[in-house]
Image (tube, helix red, strand yellow):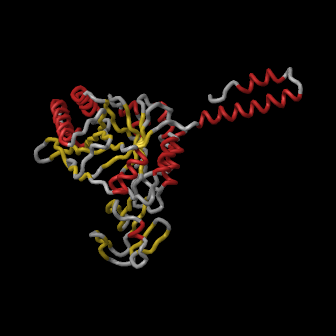
């Protein structure tokens, strides 16, 4: 325990001292105890980075400035998805990234997003072939853009039924790619690691968001992050056997509810659109449609409900503070913020993100 041993040792010394010397030692004890406490709370040396998840890569001036200032141009770019083709009965690459500007000044880690359905349907004999195709496509994209990468990340929300095939894929891909391999890990996979298994990779990326259930009940807490749901899982983080980087959310969405059912999630509908008093009646983060109309191509029916689930700087900091109580300190940790492509730049500042990262 931090600071342990100071009280009994100084207590023995103080028995033989006069009042003046005791006062000095007591003051020294306060200073040492404070320093010891601060060492427990000492910020780590974590670096910041961003995800980029859009299929077309292009940064505007503000995004470029934030990436440089907050993350030293460190970017995790989703190169492509792997999805299951029901007609051809095979996995296929989808939403392959299209670069519309040079990236030679960026420190890029390729990311492959893989649907769990792909591993539900693929045969064990085809896993090695899938690894070959993924490795080939990653390297083709990287070569075309002159991207030299030293690590790669795979994102998949695997289950107990797909665990074996997914882990076999990771082993095969690792042998082919020969770079530092990372895999995303959800909170439920941390808590139930004996059941879900630990991926055979060099490092895990703890996805510290999307921890609650998206509910049609407007009274339910924020499903992106809320302290109560997080607390059910977060204590298990300290016992996870992989070194962990962390992904934190910078996004918001609106939950579209009609007749007690969730219709859709909309990332493009935010406070700016919903605050229109001609269209909506507001009750805190809940918006009731006053009439039927179209908004940004979305049909909204009278009495529809929109629940705005937001992440702002204060909420992200709260999430980081909660996680920091359980996350073991480690060298060379990266905090990856999701995500730069759709980020509301008015909500987040480089200095604040740097402080949040330092605390982890």
Q: Residue at x 65, y 35 (%)?
A: 37
Can residue 149 be seen? yes
Residue 284 point in image, percent of width and height: 50, 67
Q: Residue at x 19, y 48 (%)?
A: 94
Say which quarter of the image contains residue 253.
bottom left
Decide which of 359, 219 is in the foreground and name it: 359
Residue 107 point in image, percent of width and height: 32, 40
Q: Is residue 261 above or below residue 85?
A: below
State the residue lying farthest toward the left.
Answer: 88
Say which quarter of the image contains residue 304.
bottom left
Can residue 168 be seen? no
Judge from the rendering whether residue 307 lies leftward or rightward of residue 58; answer left or right. right
Q: Residue at x 39, y 76 (%)?
A: 279
Decide which of 12, 101 is in the foreground and name it: 101
Image quarter where the N terminus lies is top right
Q: Is residue 307 above or below residue 84?
A: below
Judge from the rendering whether residue 162 lies leftward or rightward of residue 5; answer left or right. left
């Amino acid at each position: 325990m931090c600071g342990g041993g100071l009280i009994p040792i100084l207590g023995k010394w103080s028995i033989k001292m006069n009042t003046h010397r005791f006062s000095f030692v007591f003051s020294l004890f306060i200073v040492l105890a404070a320093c010891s406490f601060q060492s427990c709370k000492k910020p780590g040396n974590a670096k910041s980075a961003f995800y980029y998840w859009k299929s077309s890569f292009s940064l505007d001036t503000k995004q470029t400035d934030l990436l440089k200032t907050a993350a030293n141009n460190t970017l995790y770019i989703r190169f492509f998805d792997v999805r299951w083709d029901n007609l051809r009965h095979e996995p296929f690459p989808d939403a392959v990234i299209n670069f519309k500007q040079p990236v030679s000044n960026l420190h890029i880690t390729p990311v492959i997003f893989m649907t769990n359905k792909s591993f539900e349907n693929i045969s064990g004999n085809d896993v090695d072939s899938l690894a070959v195709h993924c490795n080939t496509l990653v390297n083709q994209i990287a070569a075309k853009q002159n991207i030299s990468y030293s690590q790669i990340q795979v994102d998949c929300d695997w289950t107990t039924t797909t665990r074996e095939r997914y882990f076999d894929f990771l082993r095969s891909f690792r042998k082919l790619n020969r770079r530092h391999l990372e895999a995303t890990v959800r909170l439920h996979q941390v808590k139930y690691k004996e059941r879900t298994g630990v991926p055979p990779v060099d490092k895990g990326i703890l996805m510290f968001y999307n921890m609650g259930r998206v509910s049609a009940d407007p009274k339910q807490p924020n499903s992106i992050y809320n302290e109560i749901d997080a607390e059910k899982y977060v204590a298990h983080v300290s016992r996870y056997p992989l070194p962990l980087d962390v992904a934190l959310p910078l996004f918001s969405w609106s939950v579209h509810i009609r007749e007690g059912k969730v219709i859709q999630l909309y990332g493009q509908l935010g406070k700016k659109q919903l605050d229109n008093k001609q269209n909506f009646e507001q009750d805190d983060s809940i918006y009731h449609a006053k009439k039927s109309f179209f908004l940004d191509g979305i049909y909204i029916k009278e009495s529809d409900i929109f629940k705005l689930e937001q992440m702002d700087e204060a909420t992200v900091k709260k999430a980081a503070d909660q996680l920091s109580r359980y996350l073991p300190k480690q060298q060379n940790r990266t905090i990856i913020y999701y995500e730069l492509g759709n980020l509301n730049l008015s909500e987040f500042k480089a200095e604040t993100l740097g402080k949040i990262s330092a605390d982890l």
